[in-house]
Image: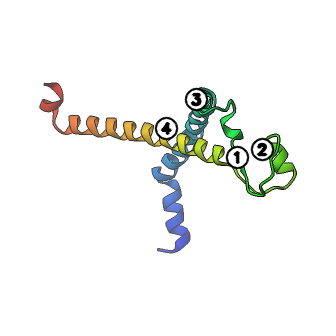
């Protein structure tokens, strides 16, 4: 079978549509997770750590003091934006936990379908 025929078979199979739906839902879900992290979780965490804007936390490597991260970026100072990094780690942890819970639920449903007497009692 030629590569084009194999691709055509792949493209018309359900796998491509499942993948497309997964990508679209994943993109929308990513926005929800970002909003949860940015708008709900990070402001209190930033406040507890002594700064109101968690994403604005940085360290200028040139030893100078800047009014804020935007001023350091405008001055083309080398910076470590550790606030952004921590934000991304929190977003990843939320996403990983939610996916874990979804997979766990799916596995329980599958095992319940495989063992109906176990699921009912």
Q: In screen coordinates, is 10 left or right of 45? A: left
Q: Please tell me how crowded label 4 is: few (under 14), some (14-19), or many (20+) other residues with Cα within 10 Å.
A: some
- Image point 81% across, 55% down: which residue? 77
Alpha-carbon distance for marks 1 and 3? Answer: 17 Å
Give the mark, 2 or 1, whose residue is nearer the N terminus.
1
Q: Position of residue 90 (x, y in %)?
A: 53, 40
Asked which secondary structure carries label 2, the reply is: helix
Give the mark, 4 or 2, whose residue is nearer the N terminus.
2
Question: Of the residues tagged 4 and 3, which is closer to the observer?
Answer: 3
User: Considering depth in this image, is 110 or 103 the residue closer to the camera?
Assistant: 103
Q: Position of residue 48 (x, y in %)?
A: 58, 29
Asked which secondary structure carries label 4, the reply is: helix
Alpha-carbon distance for marks 4 and 2? Answer: 26 Å
Question: Of the residues tagged 4 and 1, which is closer to the observer?
Answer: 1
Say if mark 4 contacts mark 3, CB within 8 Å.
Answer: no
Say if mark 2 contacts mark 1, CB within 8 Å.
Answer: yes
Alpha-carbon distance for marks 2 and 1? Answer: 7 Å
- Judge whether 70 appears above or below 4 on screen: above
The disc at residue 48 is 3
The disc at residue 113 is none
The disc at residue 58 is 1
Q: Which residue is mark 2?
A: 69
- Image point 82% across, 50% down: which residue? 73
Q: Which residue is mark 4?
A: 94
């Amino acid at each position: 079978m030629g590569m084009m025929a194999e691709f055509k078979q792949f493209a018309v199979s359900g796998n491509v549509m499942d993948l497309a739906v997964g990508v679209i839902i994943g993109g929308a879900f990513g926005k929800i997770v970002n909003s949860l992290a940015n708008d709900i979780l990070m402001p209190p965490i930033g406040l507890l750590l002594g700064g109101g804007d968690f994403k604005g936390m940085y360290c200028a490597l040139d030893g100078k003091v800047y009014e804020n991260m935007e001023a350091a970026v405008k001055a083309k100072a080398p910076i470590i934006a550790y606030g952004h990094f921590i934000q991304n780690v929190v977003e990843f942890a939320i996403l990983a936990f939610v996916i874990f819970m979804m997979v766990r639920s799916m596995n329980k449903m599958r095992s319940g379908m495989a063992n109906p007497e176990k699921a009912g009692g």
